[in-house]
Amino acid sequence: MEGFLDIIAGNLLNPVILAFVLGIGAGLARAELSIPSAISKAMSIYLMFAIGLKGGIAVANSPFSMSLILALVAGAVLSFLVPFIANAFLQFTTRVDGTNRAAIAAHYGSISIVTFVTATEMLRMSGLTSEGFMVAVAALMETPAIMTGIWLANRGHGGAQSNSGLSKELVREVFLNASVVVLVGAFVIGLISTPEASQKVQPFFTDIFQGVLCIFLLDMGLIAAARLRGVKILSPAVIAFGLYMPVVGAVLGGVAGWLIGLSAGGTVLLATLSASASYIAVPAAMRLAIPKANPAISLTLSLAITFPFNVIIGIPVYLAVVRWLYGV
Amino acid sequence: MDVHPKKKIEVMVETPIVNKVIGIMRDCGATGVSVLPVLRGEGHTGDWSDKDLGGAIDMQMVMVITGPRRAAQIRDQVFAALADYRAMILLSDVEVIRNEHF
């Protein structure tokens, strides 16, 4: 048990997490600190491209395995099913109405790519490796939850809660949002590039990656703190959901990873993906698909409660638990 | 110099709906549309800021200048389309110099 706690403490004292904590603290203290939104968006594209490229190169350098197919199926199933579980928890523990429950459930079935990137970096720093194709699993898990969320919203309402008139915009938002395009695009680039050519871009996408991630998480801390100021719209039961739902998701993802035979690192990543909640792709899709849902509720919950929980407590614990169980 | 009376419509609306609003303006025959950033704000529906990475709750301003009849058509159709969204629709009288552009 002492070793387990040491692993958690070691994971917490990490510049990536500490930068995020600094951002939250500075934001809550209303410090005169802000990062221009254009730079934030550029950093997010850099991080997604780097992680996609690394995944593609890793898959290109390893033989095809059945694990890839199993991981993709597991990711898709988790993304489809987690919203049903989230919806049931909300229905029985909170007073959130059906429309907002559906929107929140979609956020929790989908994933946070920043949480995934943070988990990937923490894995690297702890000396664990993971399957390169987990990037493809992350990209795949973005969208099935949106379909479940729309179905949940329409169930019992005869379709009145969704906005079918905006289907073209919705399809574009779901399949061509920045996360999916950059992750999948960079993954394919890494997959088909020659090793010599990939080597040439490595200094940009590898050597400075951790530094960029620190600054990006500093900014994410500021953004989360700003959203945290609006937390009064959430009841204690809804806030509690934002804290226990990632643990439920992590258990489901961890068990799925173990069942399909992923490595310890891959299991941590699948647990983290399943534990995370979207605050980039899904909120925009929900505005198009379920306009009657209040975005302030779902976004505050995923960004101000679940995201900080996962980065500060969740990932170090998921990592420590998997290492302990796998004995690595 | 001659000036010509026109109507200016400004629609501040959630970013995911901006393309829908532009489409309505084009369908009504508007010859030009401008989209302006909104840095941050707050109102009875909460606050918003351009720091929202996904753009779900940040706002943008869509501006069009056109003749009075077309302006009324755009106003009515945009209002109907935005029933479920946070939005502010402003109409004002303006004067333009190059009449043929509007």
Image: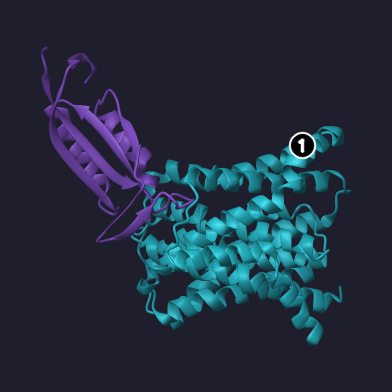
Position in image of residue A160 (x %, y %): 33, 58
Hey, which residue is sitting farthest bottom in the picture? Answer: A1
The residue nearer to you, when weighing A197 against A152, is A197
Q: Answer above or below: position of A219 versus A184.
A: below
Chain for disc number 1: A
* Colour scheme shown: by chain
Quadrant position of the C terminus of chain A in the picture: bottom right
The colour chain A appears in is cyan
> In the image, what residue occupies the spot 75% across and 82% down?
A5
Task: Describe residue A70's horizontal placement relative to residue A314 as left or right.
Answer: right
Say which quarter of the image contains residue A141: bottom right
Identify residue type, mark 1. Answer: Val
Secondary structure of the residue carrying tag 1 is helix
Quadrant position of the N terminus of chain A in the picture: bottom right
Task: Describe residue A237's horizontal placement relative to residue B3 as left or right.
Answer: right
Q: Answer above or below: position of B90 versus A281.
A: above
Position in image of residue A124 (x %, y %): 78, 60
* Residue on which disc 1 sits: A201
Task: Describe residue A48's horizontal placement relative to residue A244 as left or right.
Answer: right
Chain identifier for the purple-coloured part of the image: B
